[in-house]
Amino acid sequence: MMSAFPDDVIADILSRLPVKPLLRFRSVSKPWRGLIDSPVFIKLHLNKTKKLQAHRKLIRQGNYSDLYTVDFDGITKTNIADVVAAPHPFGTVCIVNCCNGLVCVSIPNGSGIAIWNPSTRRHQILPDFDCGPLPSSKNLRSKCHWFCGFGYDVLSDDYKVVVINQSDVSENPSLSSQVNVYSLKMNSWRQIKPFPYCLKYGNSSAEVVSGALHCIVGKIGEFDIAAFDLATEEYSIVPQPDYPGNINFNINLETLGGCLSVTWEYYGEYIDIWVLKEYGKQDSWTKITRMKVSTFSGYAFGCMRTVEYSVTEKELILGNGRINSMVRYDIEKKLVKDVKIRGQRNHGSHSDIYEESLVQLKNGDPWKEVENNSKKIEKPQKRDKFLAHGFKLVL
């Protein structure tokens, strides 16, 4: 019946589906397998998913080796979320960040860094890179700061991982830093020019917006937002909002609705959330809400992190890893609704959003689970066929 439809119509219909049925549909016919595996369809499916804001998953990191996923769209419709274990081959992991359905993780047991597609269950462990010695110091209290980010270079159609190592023994960050960039296409690392900003602010998360990685740099109270363009591999400083004063205790960088976002805490009284509506233009910074601490009575407010808008963009989804909770915050009414997380065995230390995708990686068998399920279904059929041919019923 489907053969009666033009190929472009079939592709459009399939591009709206989640990944799991698409993996099953590969066995329908060779043309369907070729279509679903093709780079053109993979991009079509990803773009359609982003446009429709569909098939989004919240990935939460528990203690040790546990990773969980939650249907993010379900969170915005109900106040109950059931987690599903996300099997992975890495042992202990730490989530770095997500991009186009791929999750970058660091592996503390010495295996380095890996890129993983939880939807297809394919992964790729990155080769080691040459990290030469950073300038040493006789001061035993000197620290080495580390930043890792993962994103997509649209110009070269390549995924890149950026690792910055920096010691605090020099006032000039360029003299005490090393930057290595990994290319998924080339499956290799190369070292580029040093990072010119100070990572002393802390372990800032990597936020991918407009083809660039972002992190907070500088010292406490003296900070900037640094950007690394994944295409040009150039560094820059992003203009900040006009905060109400120059004193702050807690600044966090987030992504909301695909835009760069800053949460600015004022003396533990309230948090302002700013969103950069038009990237690169300072006057496009917009304060979308001010959340008072008193509104979050009963929650560890200082540990709250913005996760994403709801589908209607009238609510914010906030996560709190320490007490394993999430809340929905109504931006207009300034009301909080608790979201129950069921099924996670321990507290989550990190949350991120990814959309299901078919983006391919080299290692692992993406269709193994689907094929195994197919074999389980076929076994009784083969047995029945054997019995039918091997025996005759005599009356």
Image (spheres, rainbow, N blue to C red):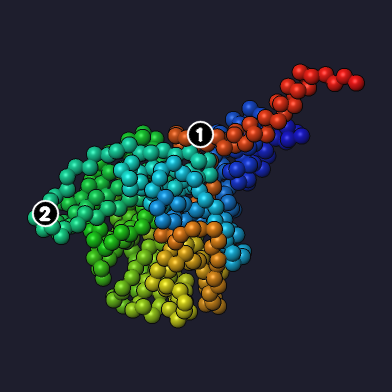
Question: Viewed as shown, does residue 141 lie left or right of 295?
Answer: left
Q: Position of residue 194 (x, y in %)?
A: 22, 48
Q: Is residue 210 above or below residue 275?
A: above
Label tally: 2
Which residue is located at x 44 percent, y 55 percent? Answer: 61
| Pick the front one: 169 or 242 | 169
Q: Is residue 245 above or below residue 152?
A: below
Quadrant assignment, res 302: bottom left
Q: CA distance from mark 2 to mark 1?
A: 47 Å
Q: Amino acid at mark 2?
A: Ser
Which residue is located at x 41 percent, y 56 percent? Answer: 63
Q: Is tag 2's residue or tag 1's residue first in the polypeptide sequence? A: 2
In the rendered image, which quarter contains the N terminus?
top right
Question: Viewed as shown, does residue 151 lie left or right of 218?
Answer: right
Q: Position of residue 392 (x, y in %)?
A: 83, 19
Q: Is residue 325 visible?
A: yes
Which residue is located at x 59 percent, y 53 percent? Answer: 54
| Pick the front one: 387 or 57 | 387
| Pick the front one: 272 or 96 | 96
Q: Secondary structure at mark 2?
A: loop
- Mark 2 neighbour density, 10 Å: few (under 14) some (14–19) many (20 or more): few
- Mark 1 neighbour density, 10 Å: few (under 14) some (14–19) many (20 or more): few
Question: Viewed as shown, does residue 280 lie left or right of 380?
Answer: left
What residue would you read off at disc 2?
137
Q: Is residue 53 visible?
A: no
Q: Position of residue 11 (x, y in %)?
A: 64, 39
Give me the disc on residue 365. 1
Q: Amino acid at mark 1?
A: Asp
Q: Secondary structure at mark 1?
A: loop
